[in-house]
Image (cartoon, helix red, strand yellow):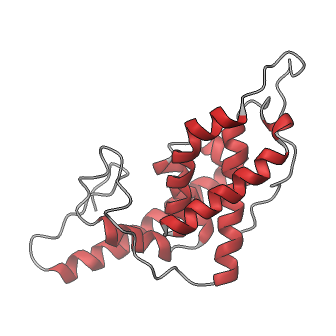
Amino acid sequence: MRLRGILRKPPRPDNAAEAAPVDFADFVRARSGALVRTATLLVGDLHTAEDLVQHALEKACRNWARIGIADSPEAYVRRIVANLANDRWRQLNQAPSVPLADDRTRPEPGYGRIEHRDELMRALLRLPMGMRTVLVLRYFDEQSDAEIADALDITAGAVRSQAARGLAKLRAHMHDAARSDGPGADVIHLPFGEAV
């Protein structure tokens, strides 16, 4: 799935002439952490994610006069991040083999209680890029189906379909992993508020 429109003009508010632009440096300070988290979930490696976000912010900076007055500058930059991750995935054509380092990536409160975090991340990285992108945007970035559809330039129905199929694949993989862990590992809690 190609995430189209990376250089498409961001939507302008009705009062674009009167809208005060968001300062780029303030935006970077406030939102770069969330962008790095999203990119890490998409590519599976913190260092690659940081490079990806830096590249996305560089692209956004060049057009910040337009992006800064848009309704949601972050949605525009997230689209760039998703497109860059998709391009990288297509070039590698394989899942990254570098495991996430627990000492470098501290999960936000609530994610730390996941017992099988590494296994979940590995399962997530095995999903096709479209499914993974939808799941990351929906469950980790808490975006609505409409926001995801707009960001990825697909329909809301496609978002729901990708999410359902992705969750089914994650459940199947996590059940297989739980069976191989032996007794007492039959219930796994996903960060999505569901037990499998």
Residue 6 percent location from the top left of the image: 80, 55
Q: Which residue lies furthest to the front in this view?
A: 25
Please say whether residue 153 is visible from this viewpoint.
no
Q: Residue furthest left?
A: 183
Q: Name which residue lies at 65% across and 42% down.
A: 147
> In the rendered view of the protein, which quadrant contains the N terminus?
bottom right
Please say whether residue 125 is visible from this viewpoint.
yes
Q: Name which residue lies at 54% across and 54% down.
A: 36
Q: Name which residue lies at 45% across and 69% down.
A: 124
Q: Is residue 183 left or right of residue 86?
A: left
> In the rendered view of the protein, which quadrant contains the C terminus?
bottom left
Vertical side of 123 occupied by 5: above or below: above
Q: Which of 98 and 61 is in front in this view?
A: 61
Q: Is residue 192 left or right of residue 152?
A: left
Residue 111 percent location from the top left of the image: 32, 51
Residue 175 percent location from the top left of the image: 28, 73
Toward which corner of the image does residue 19 lie, by quadrant? top right
Q: In this view, does 78 lie to the left or right of 2?
A: left
Toward which corner of the image does residue 119 lie, by quadrant? bottom left
